[in-house]
C-alpha cells in the first residue's frame, strides 16, 4: 500500500512538471512570437515614411521669379521716332513727357530720351567736368561715376555709368538703389542723351544694349 502511494506521488509530480514545462514553453513561444511581430508592427511606420518621401517627390519645384527690375527676355521693342532720330523702347511701358524729354517707365525701370542742341561733340573730359557736377546735384546719393567712350551702331558715344537713389514710391515710400547708363549721341550740332536706369542688382545688360544699339540718326 505504501509503495502504491509513493508511485502515485511520483506520477503526480511528473504530471505537474510536464504541465509547468508546457506553460513555460507556451510563454516562450508567445514571447518569441511577440519579438517576431515587432518588425511587422513597425512596418506601417516604415510604410508611412515611404509615403511621405513619395509625397515630397511629387510636390512641384519651387517657382523661380526674376529679381526685382529684371526685364523679361521675351520683351518686345518698338521704335520711338524723335526729331531727327529713332530708338527702340520696350513695348507697353508708360510714356510721359518731362520738360523736353520723353520717359518710358515700367515698375522699377526707365528709359529717358532728352534731345538738345550742342555745337561740339561731347568728350570724356567735357562730360567729366560739366555733366558729372550736374548729375551729382540732381541725383540723390549720387555715387560711383565712370566716364568712358564706347561704340554703338550709331558710332562713337560717351557713356556715363553711376548709381543713385530712386524717388520715393508714393504708395509704399520705398526707395530703390538704381544703376544708370547715360549715353550722349551727337551729330551736326544735335545731341540726344539716352539714360537707362533700373535696380542695381537687376540683370539688364542685354536689354540696355538692345536699346542703346538701336539708336540711329535719320
Image (cartoon, rainbow, N blue to C red):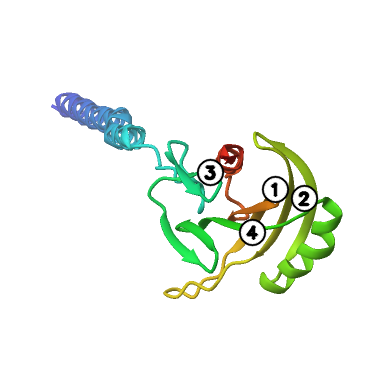
Q: Mark 3 and mark 2: span between their CA atoms?
A: 19 Å
Q: Which disc, if any, is residue 116? A: 4
Residue that label 3 marks:
87
Of the 4 image quadrants, the one containing the N terminus is top left
Find residue 121 and name its label: 2
Using a 10 Å C-alpha cutoff, classify the residue at mark 2 as few (fewer than 14 neighbours), some (14 to 19) or many (20 or more): some
Most foreground residue, 213 or 85: 85
Closer to the chain start, of discs 3 and 2, is: 3
Question: Which quadrant is home to the C terminus?
Answer: top right
Residue that appears at 75% across and 64% down: 143
Characterize the local packing of mark 4: few (<14), some (14-19) or many (20 or more) Cα atoms within 10 angstroms.
Answer: few
Q: Tell me where residue 133 sits by quadrant.
A: bottom right
Does 151 sit left or right of 71 as displayed? Answer: right
Question: Could you classify mark 3 by the number of other residues whose Cα lies within 10 Å: few (under 14), some (14-19), or many (20 or more)?
Answer: many
Question: Mark 2 or mark 1, which is nearer the start of the sequence?
Answer: 2
Q: Secondary structure at mark 2?
A: loop
Q: Element at badge 3?
A: strand
SS state under label 1 = strand
Amino acid at each position: 500500500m505504501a509503495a502504491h502511494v509513493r508511485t502515485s506521488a511520483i506520477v503526480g509530480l511528473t504530471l505537474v512538471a510536464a504541465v509547468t514545462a508546457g506553460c513555460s514553453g507556451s510563454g516562450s513561444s508567445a514571447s518569441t512570437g511577440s519579438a517576431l511581430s515587432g518588425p511587422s508592427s513597425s512596418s506601417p511606420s516604415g510604410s508611412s515614411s515611404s509615403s511621405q518621401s513619395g509625397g515630397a517627390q511629387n510636390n512641384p519645384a519651387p517657382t523661380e521669379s526674376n529679381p526685382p527690375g529684371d526685364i523679361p527676355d521675351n520683351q518686345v521693342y518698338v521704335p520711338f521716332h524723335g526729331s531727327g532720330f529713332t530708338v527702340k523702347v520696350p513695348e507697353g511701358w508708360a510714356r510721359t513727357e518731362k520738360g523736353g524729354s520723353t520717359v518710358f517707365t515700367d515698375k522699377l525701370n526707365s528709359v529717358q530720351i532728352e534731345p538738345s542742341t550742342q555745337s561740339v561733340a561731347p568728350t570724356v573730359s567735357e562730360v567729366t567736368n560739366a555733366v558729372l557736377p550736374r548729375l551729382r546735384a540732381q541725383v540723390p546719393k549720387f555715387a560711383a561715376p565712370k566716364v568712358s567712350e564706347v561704340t554703338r551702331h550709331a558710332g562713337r558715344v560717351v557713356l556715363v555709368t553711376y548709381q543713385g537713389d530712386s524717388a520715393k514710391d508714393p504708395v509704399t515710400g520705398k526707395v530703390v538703389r538704381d544703376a544708370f547708363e547715360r549715353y550722349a549721341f551727337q551729330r551736326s550740332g544735335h545731341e540726344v542723351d539716352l539714360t537707362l536706369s533700373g535696380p542695381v542688382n537687376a540683370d539688364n545688360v542685354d536689354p540696355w544694349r538692345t536699346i542703346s544699339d538701336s539708336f540711329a540718326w535719320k
